[in-house]
Amino acid sequence: MKRLLTLLLIAISLNSIAYEWRLIGTSSSAQSVVYNLAVEGYQQGFDKWLELAKKGDDVAQFRIGFLYMYGKDDERMYAGLIDDISEWDNIENDRQGIYWLEKSAAQGNRDGLHNIGVCNLYGYGVLRNPPKGLNLLIKAAEAGSWDAMDVLGFYYVNGFFVEKSLDKAAFWINKAFEVVPDSEEFTLSQSKERWDKYELWKYL
């Protein structure tokens, strides 16, 4: 369903959708979930995070929500969320994912805010609400998410969901450059290309 929905949102922009899906899969927050799950052991990690999430841990809430919403087929099967690949688009999993992402976002978790913002922007697991999604994405960026800063820079360069503004694109991309750890710089490779292409340093 989510893959079909993506195709139906061509009116927004194929480039925008493709970029956001790339970020979901390769963002620092996504890689952190995958890495930590592998280290913990799939079932053990999921059980541990779920217990912590229920106790109010915002990081665990994000990780559980992410797995329900976006986890890869093998990760979701190992964690017991699906029995086979055909159950990828399970409505109940989407509901659980949204529930935990919203819990995490409500506590100000930057990754929770970023991901629930994406869900609202494109209608993943919720009714599509671009204004709400954009507001959540800005909150994520203000909370320090360089992934969200990167996305905002992309939106402002292209005029997706917002009025095109190279000033604001420069602001957010530059903020991302300032806060991203050296080990995560590769996640901003496309922002670096836009920085040079549009000479965004001139707009600071």
Image (tube, grey):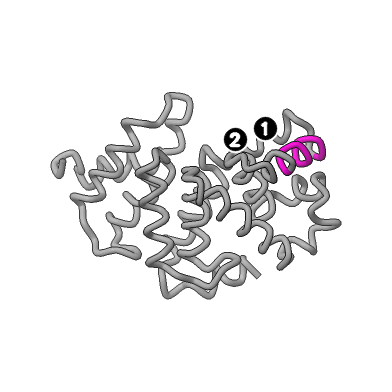
Question: Callout 2, which amino acid?
Answer: Ser
Q: Position of residue 98 (x, y in %)?
A: 61, 59
Which residue occupies the extreme right position in the image? 83
Q: Position of residue 150 (x, y in %)?
A: 38, 45
Q: Position of residue 62 (x, y in %)?
A: 59, 45
Name the residue rendered at 23%, 44% in the picture.
170
Q: Label 1: state its secondary structure.
A: helix
Name the residue rendered at 21%, 56% in the picture.
165
Q: Which residue is mark 1?
A: 36
CA–CA distance between discs 1 and 2? 6 Å
Name the residue rendered at 75%, 30% in the picture.
40
Crowdedness near tag 2: few (<14), some (14–19) or many (≥20) residues, C-alpha within 10 Å: few
Asked whether the residues under the numbered discs 1 and 2 touch, taking CB atoms below 8 Å apart as contact, a structural biologist would say: yes
Is 47 a magenta residue? Answer: yes
Q: Which residue is mark 2?
A: 32
Which residue occupies the extreme top position in the image? 182
Left or right of 99 in this view: 131: left
Is the residue 32 above or below the residue 66 in the image? above
Name the residue rendered at 41%, 64% in the picture.
132
Give residue 5's quadrant in the image. bottom right
